[in-house]
Image (cartoon, grey):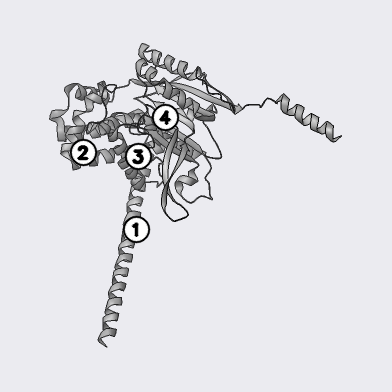
Amino acid sequence: MQTIIGALHKHGRRYQLRIRSTLTSWKWRLARAAMVQRRLIAYRINVICARRTLRSVNGRRFLELESLLAEFLLRRLNDDPVFARSVACQLLNVLKHCDQITYEEPGTAEAYALLHFLDRYHRFQLIFEYLHQIKLMPLRTDGVRILDVGTGPGPSMYAVSDFYSNTLPKRQNEDSIREQAGFSIDYVERSYQFRNWLHHFTEFVNYYCPTQIPWLVPFHHGTFDDFQNLEFNQTEIRLERDDDGEQVPFHYVRRHRFDLIVFSNFLTTKEQTAAFSKEIENCARYLRNDGILVVVGAKSSSKKYKEVYGEIEKTIVLGRYSNRKLVARCQRVMLSDSVMGYSWKDGYGERLKALTKSVFDALQAHAGDVIPKEAADLLRNSVQPEYSRPIEWELLVFRKKARPRQQTPNPSVHRTLRDKAAQRR
């Protein structure tokens, strides 16, 4: 009898734990559903109150990402005042010395994201929309592969994720959301601070986004660490079992080929561009047919960037891409107007000001004494209602064309076949 009672008590305890686990799971699901609904209502009110230009597909997505970016930054600054001081100390470096710093200092990634992320995201919204209008954006039914070189906090990856999510048809026979999307993104980034930012920020926005439409940006660390000596054919090792059941290393080559490669404010000096000539040429070499390489930076009216763009064009156009199987070339696409822009006074510019002001106010509250005076003056000036400086950049596009090489008939082979046919006759 004691055994029976003990067994019933044991099973009863097990069922209690199972019921408790089920209730906890449902409690979490209900809490998350309520949170999503609250965020969705606030997001829709935000869209209704915004300017008409922000009610487009791109505008609504911009508003959604803006609110998430502000929340992410403010949470981090308010939760950790010591970290807020690190971010404040890096504002001037990001504003004035972005070509010299390593971006490995604590707080650099957040300072850069505050000043540049949303602006660059909107730039690429405009760029990809324009390239699609002139039929240059790759649209492949077998999947589009994208590489972002020097991604930083990843604004171009967020924009390209939105573009292809809205443009490519979904693959219904695939299981995961990423496989259904029909595109995949990879990136090159050396800075640990930026990689860490991407990991945490992408997880945050995909969990809290009001529309529950995720950004398919790699939140893991990208395949490529450094642009120097970038290798598109990587030898990798995996363990397999032999006939005796022992694990043995198996070497194989993983080949990376892309349809879209983006350089966003990565190549900033002629010397740097010349030093990376082999890597730039390889980027064009491993583009697939009809793939494009996009370079975005300051206007070429600047002597500095005119030299940079000239060096890039020379490297890519003069590269040799044909081999025994393919005839290939990569040429610059002459755009009707390579200079693009928007204004601090339009709907997008005003939202940028609002974001910068809210986060800058938090920084002043937590670490106002360590913000460099020059940086503080620049930021105060940029968020004034009358500030209307145009935001402009230049766009370069190179397109890859490749076709199978026609095999030249071997005369000796044809002669042998002709002789054999004559003998049979």
Give the alpha-carbon distance from disc 2 to disc 1, as whole Å. 29 Å
Give the alpha-carbon distance from disc 2 to disc 4, as whole Å. 27 Å
329 w.r.t. 211: above or below: above
The quadrant in which the C terminus is found is top right
Which residue ends up furthest to the bottom in the rendered image?
1
Label 1, secondary structure: give it.
helix
Which residue is located at x 43 percent, y 33 percent?
A: 147
Look at the image and tell me whether residue 354 can be seen. no
Label 2, secondary structure: give it.
helix
The answer to which of marks 1 and 4 sits earlier in the sequence is 1
Indicate the position of residue 316 as horizontal and vertical percent values. 48, 20
Left or right of residue 384: residue 332: right
The kind of residue on which mark 1 rests is: Arg
Q: Identify the residue position indicated by label 1 in the image.
A: 29
The quadrant in which the N terminus is found is bottom left
391 w.r.t. 179: above or below: above
Q: Identify the residue position indicated by label 4 in the image.
A: 124
Indicate the position of residue 20 as horizontal and vertical percent values. 29, 67
The kind of residue on which mark 2 rests is: Leu
Look at the image and tell me whether residue 134 can be seen. yes
The answer to which of marks 1 and 3 sits earlier in the sequence is 1
Residue 77's tag is 2
Label 3, secondary structure: give it.
loop
The answer to which of marks 4 and 3 sits earlier in the sequence is 4
Indicate the position of residue 349 as horizontal and vertical percent values. 34, 28
Left or right of residue 421: residue 29: left
The answer to which of marks 2 and 4 sits earlier in the sequence is 2
Q: Identify the residue position indicated by label 3 in the image.
A: 221
Give the alpha-carbon distance from disc 1 to disc 3, as whole Å. 29 Å
Number of the front mark, 4 or 3: 3
Give the alpha-carbon distance from disc 2 to disc 3, as whole Å. 24 Å
Left or right of residue 101: residue 415: right
